[in-house]
Image: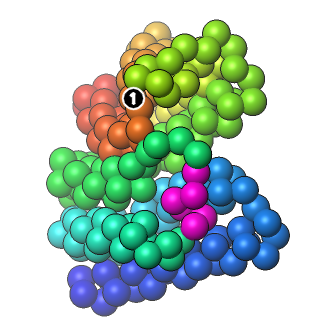
Amino acid sequence: MILGVFAYSIIGLTFFFIIEFIKVYFLLRAENSRKLIHVGSCLIVCTMPFFIDKIGIMILSGLFIVLFVLSRNFGIFSSIHEVSRKTIGEFSMAAGVGISAVVLLPSGIIAFVYGMLILGFADTSANIIGSKWKIWEFKIMSQSKSIGGTTAFFLCSIMISYFTAYYVGLDIKLEMLLIFCLILALIEAVHIFGVDNLSIPVISGIFWDYFTY
Protein backbone atom coordinates (compact mmCIF):
# COMPACT_ATOMS: atom_id res chain seq x y z
CA MET A 1 0.00 0.00 0.00
CA ILE A 2 2.78 2.45 0.92
CA LEU A 3 4.46 1.91 -2.44
CA GLY A 4 1.17 2.50 -4.24
CA VAL A 5 0.46 5.70 -2.30
CA PHE A 6 3.97 6.93 -3.07
CA ALA A 7 3.62 6.05 -6.77
CA TYR A 8 0.29 7.85 -7.13
CA SER A 9 1.66 10.86 -5.23
CA ILE A 10 4.46 11.13 -7.79
CA ILE A 11 2.04 10.59 -10.69
CA GLY A 12 -0.28 13.31 -9.38
CA LEU A 13 2.50 15.83 -8.75
CA THR A 14 4.07 15.14 -12.14
CA PHE A 15 0.72 15.66 -13.85
CA PHE A 16 0.14 18.97 -12.04
CA PHE A 17 3.62 20.25 -12.93
CA ILE A 18 3.13 19.28 -16.59
CA ILE A 19 -0.13 21.23 -16.79
CA GLU A 20 1.50 24.13 -14.95
CA PHE A 21 4.29 24.15 -17.55
CA ILE A 22 1.78 24.03 -20.40
CA LYS A 23 -0.19 26.92 -18.88
CA VAL A 24 2.88 29.13 -18.45
CA TYR A 25 4.67 28.21 -21.69
CA PHE A 26 1.62 28.32 -23.98
CA LEU A 27 -0.13 31.14 -22.05
CA LEU A 28 -3.12 28.91 -21.37
CA ARG A 29 -6.00 30.51 -19.49
CA ALA A 30 -6.39 29.26 -15.92
CA GLU A 31 -9.98 28.20 -16.64
CA ASN A 32 -8.72 25.88 -19.40
CA SER A 33 -5.76 24.50 -17.44
CA ARG A 34 -8.11 23.80 -14.54
CA LYS A 35 -10.41 21.81 -16.85
CA LEU A 36 -7.44 19.74 -18.05
CA ILE A 37 -6.45 19.03 -14.46
CA HIS A 38 -10.04 18.18 -13.55
CA VAL A 39 -10.47 15.60 -16.31
CA GLY A 40 -6.94 14.19 -16.02
CA SER A 41 -7.16 13.86 -12.25
CA CYS A 42 -10.45 11.99 -12.51
CA LEU A 43 -8.95 9.55 -15.03
CA ILE A 44 -5.96 8.96 -12.75
CA VAL A 45 -8.26 8.36 -9.78
CA CYS A 46 -10.29 5.85 -11.85
CA THR A 47 -7.26 3.53 -11.90
CA MET A 48 -6.58 3.69 -8.16
CA PRO A 49 -8.92 0.90 -6.91
CA PHE A 50 -7.14 -1.58 -9.19
CA PHE A 51 -3.74 -0.95 -7.58
CA ILE A 52 -4.27 0.31 -4.02
CA ASP A 53 -6.86 -0.35 -1.33
CA LYS A 54 -9.38 2.12 0.03
CA ILE A 55 -7.15 3.11 2.96
CA GLY A 56 -4.46 4.11 0.48
CA ILE A 57 -6.96 6.18 -1.50
CA MET A 58 -8.12 7.90 1.69
CA ILE A 59 -4.50 8.73 2.58
CA LEU A 60 -3.92 10.17 -0.90
CA SER A 61 -7.09 12.22 -0.54
CA GLY A 62 -5.76 13.74 2.69
CA LEU A 63 -2.30 14.36 1.22
CA PHE A 64 -3.68 16.23 -1.76
CA ILE A 65 -5.93 18.37 0.43
CA VAL A 66 -2.79 19.42 2.31
CA LEU A 67 -0.99 20.01 -1.01
CA PHE A 68 -3.81 22.25 -2.27
CA VAL A 69 -3.78 24.28 0.95
CA LEU A 70 -0.04 24.85 0.56
CA SER A 71 -0.39 25.55 -3.15
CA ARG A 72 -3.10 28.16 -2.64
CA ASN A 73 -1.18 29.88 0.17
CA PHE A 74 2.18 29.91 -1.63
CA GLY A 75 1.01 30.19 -5.25
CA ILE A 76 2.54 26.91 -6.41
CA PHE A 77 -0.05 25.77 -8.97
CA SER A 78 -1.56 28.80 -10.68
CA SER A 79 -3.13 26.39 -13.18
CA ILE A 80 -5.46 25.22 -10.40
CA HIS A 81 -6.18 28.32 -8.35
CA GLU A 82 -6.14 31.33 -10.69
CA VAL A 83 -9.79 31.39 -11.70
CA SER A 84 -12.13 34.36 -11.55
CA ARG A 85 -14.98 32.67 -9.67
CA LYS A 86 -15.01 31.77 -5.99
CA THR A 87 -14.46 28.04 -5.64
CA ILE A 88 -13.16 25.37 -3.31
CA GLY A 89 -13.45 22.78 -6.06
CA GLU A 90 -9.92 21.40 -5.73
CA PHE A 91 -10.42 20.71 -2.01
CA SER A 92 -13.90 19.25 -2.42
CA MET A 93 -12.72 16.98 -5.24
CA ALA A 94 -9.91 15.54 -3.11
CA ALA A 95 -12.39 15.07 -0.26
CA GLY A 96 -14.90 13.51 -2.68
CA VAL A 97 -12.34 10.91 -3.74
CA GLY A 98 -11.71 9.94 -0.12
CA ILE A 99 -15.40 9.80 0.80
CA SER A 100 -16.19 7.80 -2.35
CA ALA A 101 -13.54 5.28 -1.29
CA VAL A 102 -15.05 5.02 2.20
CA VAL A 103 -18.61 4.58 0.91
CA LEU A 104 -18.09 2.45 -2.21
CA LEU A 105 -14.93 0.37 -1.82
CA PRO A 106 -13.85 -2.38 -1.89
CA SER A 107 -17.03 -3.98 -3.26
CA GLY A 108 -18.15 -1.14 -5.55
CA ILE A 109 -15.16 -0.60 -7.82
CA ILE A 110 -17.37 -0.03 -10.87
CA ALA A 111 -19.50 2.44 -8.90
CA PHE A 112 -16.35 4.29 -7.79
CA VAL A 113 -15.01 4.51 -11.34
CA TYR A 114 -18.43 5.50 -12.65
CA GLY A 115 -18.69 8.36 -10.15
CA MET A 116 -15.28 9.69 -11.17
CA LEU A 117 -16.18 9.49 -14.87
CA ILE A 118 -19.36 11.47 -14.23
CA LEU A 119 -17.35 14.07 -12.32
CA GLY A 120 -14.60 14.21 -14.93
CA PHE A 121 -16.63 14.38 -18.12
CA ALA A 122 -20.26 15.28 -17.38
CA ASP A 123 -19.31 18.02 -14.93
CA THR A 124 -16.70 19.44 -17.31
CA SER A 125 -19.11 19.38 -20.26
CA ALA A 126 -21.64 21.32 -18.14
CA ASN A 127 -18.97 23.91 -17.38
CA ILE A 128 -17.86 24.29 -21.00
CA ILE A 129 -21.33 24.38 -22.58
CA GLY A 130 -22.77 26.50 -19.78
CA SER A 131 -19.99 29.08 -20.25
CA LYS A 132 -20.20 29.26 -24.05
CA TRP A 133 -23.96 28.97 -24.53
CA LYS A 134 -25.66 30.62 -21.57
CA ILE A 135 -29.15 29.36 -22.38
CA TRP A 136 -31.71 30.37 -19.75
CA GLU A 137 -29.10 31.51 -17.28
CA PHE A 138 -29.96 31.72 -13.58
CA LYS A 139 -28.03 32.53 -10.41
CA ILE A 140 -27.63 30.72 -7.11
CA MET A 141 -25.94 32.88 -4.45
CA SER A 142 -24.29 35.06 -7.14
CA GLN A 143 -22.93 32.05 -9.08
CA SER A 144 -24.22 31.64 -12.63
CA LYS A 145 -25.83 28.43 -13.84
CA SER A 146 -27.69 27.70 -17.05
CA ILE A 147 -30.11 25.22 -18.54
CA GLY A 148 -27.56 24.74 -21.32
CA GLY A 149 -24.93 23.50 -18.87
CA THR A 150 -27.44 21.28 -17.06
CA THR A 151 -28.55 19.78 -20.37
CA ALA A 152 -24.93 19.07 -21.32
CA PHE A 153 -24.39 17.31 -17.99
CA PHE A 154 -27.57 15.27 -18.52
CA LEU A 155 -26.65 14.14 -22.04
CA CYS A 156 -23.03 13.36 -21.14
CA SER A 157 -24.08 11.37 -18.07
CA ILE A 158 -26.45 9.32 -20.25
CA MET A 159 -23.56 8.39 -22.55
CA ILE A 160 -21.27 7.51 -19.63
CA SER A 161 -24.01 5.45 -17.97
CA TYR A 162 -24.81 3.59 -21.19
CA PHE A 163 -21.21 2.73 -22.03
CA THR A 164 -20.43 1.74 -18.44
CA ALA A 165 -23.45 -0.58 -18.39
CA TYR A 166 -22.47 -1.99 -21.78
CA TYR A 167 -18.89 -2.56 -20.63
CA VAL A 168 -19.92 -4.54 -17.53
CA GLY A 169 -22.76 -6.35 -19.32
CA LEU A 170 -25.73 -4.74 -17.56
CA ASP A 171 -29.11 -4.19 -19.16
CA ILE A 172 -30.50 -0.92 -17.75
CA LYS A 173 -34.01 0.13 -18.80
CA LEU A 174 -34.12 3.39 -20.73
CA GLU A 175 -36.62 5.10 -18.43
CA MET A 176 -34.54 4.20 -15.38
CA LEU A 177 -31.42 5.54 -17.08
CA LEU A 178 -33.12 8.83 -17.95
CA ILE A 179 -34.48 9.36 -14.42
CA PHE A 180 -31.11 8.46 -12.95
CA CYS A 181 -29.21 10.96 -15.12
CA LEU A 182 -31.84 13.69 -14.69
CA ILE A 183 -31.50 13.49 -10.90
CA LEU A 184 -27.71 13.78 -11.18
CA ALA A 185 -28.04 16.78 -13.52
CA LEU A 186 -30.40 18.55 -11.12
CA ILE A 187 -28.06 17.88 -8.20
CA GLU A 188 -25.17 19.39 -10.16
CA ALA A 189 -27.28 22.41 -11.14
CA VAL A 190 -27.95 23.52 -7.55
CA HIS A 191 -24.37 23.16 -6.29
CA ILE A 192 -22.08 26.19 -6.08
CA PHE A 193 -18.48 27.05 -5.17
CA GLY A 194 -17.27 23.70 -6.56
CA VAL A 195 -18.91 21.64 -3.81
CA ASP A 196 -20.36 19.36 -6.51
CA ASN A 197 -16.84 17.94 -6.87
CA LEU A 198 -17.47 16.25 -3.53
CA SER A 199 -21.11 15.28 -3.87
CA ILE A 200 -21.32 14.19 -7.52
CA PRO A 201 -18.88 11.22 -7.41
CA VAL A 202 -20.31 9.99 -4.10
CA ILE A 203 -23.97 10.31 -5.11
CA SER A 204 -23.31 8.94 -8.61
CA GLY A 205 -21.58 5.89 -7.18
CA ILE A 206 -24.34 5.26 -4.65
CA PHE A 207 -26.98 5.64 -7.37
CA TRP A 208 -25.10 3.24 -9.63
CA ASP A 209 -25.00 0.60 -6.90
CA TYR A 210 -28.71 1.12 -6.15
CA PHE A 211 -29.96 1.07 -9.74
CA THR A 212 -27.80 -1.89 -10.76
CA TYR A 213 -28.23 -4.01 -7.63
Is 95 positioned to the left or the right of 126 in the image?
A: left
Q: Nearer the viewer, residue 124 or 3?
A: 124
Q: Which residues are magenta?
A: 78-83
| Residue 130, image x, y percentages | 65, 27
Q: Is residue 196 above or below residue 43?
A: above
Q: Nearer the viewer, residue 162 or 135?
A: 135
Most common secondary structure along the magenta stretch: helix
Identify the residue at image location x=43%, y=20%.
140
Decide if residue 54 is on the left or right side of residue 51.
Answer: left
Looking at the figure, which quarter contains the N terminus?
bottom left
The structure residue drawn at horizontal position 39% and vertical position 80%, both measured from the top left corner, is 9
Q: Where is residue 27? Give x, y as percent.
A: 79, 66
Residue sitting at x 61%, y 25%? 149
Helix, strand, or loop for circle 1?
loop
How many C-alpha atoms fall within 10 Å of the one at disc 1: few (<14), some, or many (≥20)?
A: some
- Magenta segment includes 69: no
The residue at which mark 1 appears reads as 191
